[in-house]
Image: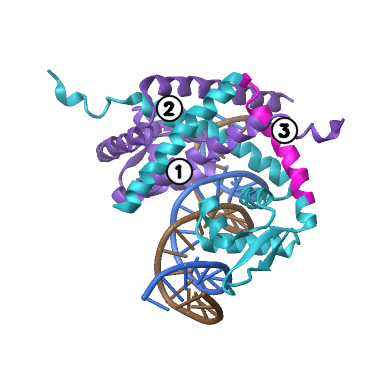
Chain colours: A purple, B cyan, C blue, D brown
Amino acid sequence: MDMEARGHREHPEALRLWLRLLTCTQLIEKQVRGQLREQFETTLPRFDLMAQLERNPDGLKMNELSRRMMVTGGNVTGITDQLVTEGLVERVDVEGDRRAYRVRLTTRGRKTFDDMARQHEDWIVQAFGGLSAREIETLHKLLGKVKQHQTDLNQEMENA
Amino acid sequence: MDMEARGHREHPEALRLWLRLLTCTQLIEKQVRGQLREQFETTLPRFDLMAQLERNPDGLKMNELSRRMMVTGGNVTGITDQLVTEGLVERVDVEGDRRAYRVRLTTRGRKTFDDMARQHEDWIVQAFGGLSAREIETLHKLLGKVKQHQTDLNQEMENA
DNA sequence: TATTGTTATACTCTATAACTATA
DNA sequence: TATAGTTATAGAGTATAACAATA
């Protein structure tokens, strides 16, 4: 009896997990944003863009940045413009395609990013200071499954 | 030798974990936001506010909502105003303190929220569909540690 | 004086769509 | 026609600070 009362409370565990995931991310993100602003007068998207470039010394095209940062193109243009103005990144022509170019860190940009990255890593290490190395690895692995599943779902949607 | 090269790459695991945590949250969040907009013409903060009220049938004061939603007071006023206009929540006087009141769901608001919550739960169940019940529990538990540690850190900062 | 909540403001980030230039 | 990137715009979301009313 009371079969109807089931249905929509059948998987509360997933919901609880989501709320907790969201809370954890927001707590850490809020702190990182605040520290980036206070200590370096920058923002998370700007830091993120520079981090992408740091991993790709030859630079990245706008659409590559757009995809990796998971935002649309117009936004990348705006953030890039700011960083160019401050001399932290530069636009370099791509030979063979005059529509495109690569964005890459300037020498000064790389130095600035290294400073930020060092601090950033400290904040993150501290944020996960309550976990053992083993637990961190487990979390990383499980979230890898979540990410993969999510990616699969997105591809299904695109193909449909 | 090369002692200096250590230091800032000593805990890359925490960093990798953070990036993955952020990615997972953004992927799911982006989808939930989109669905809320498409199917219910609402936003995540509005849904969040209503969810807080659903868990507290007697309503919550503005500062309680502010704390639980982790945003400052002015924003809660704005979101509440919208929901009042649409007849989904109402402001109720608190007896004994004429400065304050409680915000609570209207009958219509509760019905509307139930519809949204049912859908929302489906999206979330799907988002974590790649995990077993056991894995979901493990994730939940580990993230609980992260949350607790983060809460402790914040309290230390406030006391300092 | 402190607290509750509002108002005013400004800024970042974002998506969308129309646009230019090149392929 | 399609692709790379920009521009323009509008809106969400946020923090900050000054403010009014009450405690």
- The residue carrying mark 2 is B17
Quadrant in the picture for residue D1: top right
Against A82, residue A122 (above or below) is above
Q: Are marks 2 and 3 on the same chain?
A: yes
What percent of the width, then of the height, locates residue A86?
32, 49
Image: magenta residue range: B111-133
Q: First in sequence, mark 2 or 3: give its number.
A: 2
Residues at marks 1 and 3, CA–CA distance in whole angstroms = 25 Å
Query: Quick check: is A126 in the magenta stretch?
Result: no
Q: Residue at x 58, y 32 (%)?
A: A17
Q: Is residue A93 left or right of residue B64?
A: left
The residue shown at (35%, 32%) is A129
Q: Is residue B131 visible?
A: no
Q: Secondary structure at mark 2?
A: helix
Residue that protrudes farthest toward the right in the picture = A1
Q: Relative to D23, is B54 above or below?
A: above
Residue identified by numbered label 3:
B122
**Residue, x 79% and y 32% (percent of image)?**
A6
Q: Amino acid at mark 2?
A: Leu
Amino acid type, callout 1: Leu
The reply to whether callout 2 and callout 1 are in contact (CB within 8 Å) is: no
Chain under disc 2: B
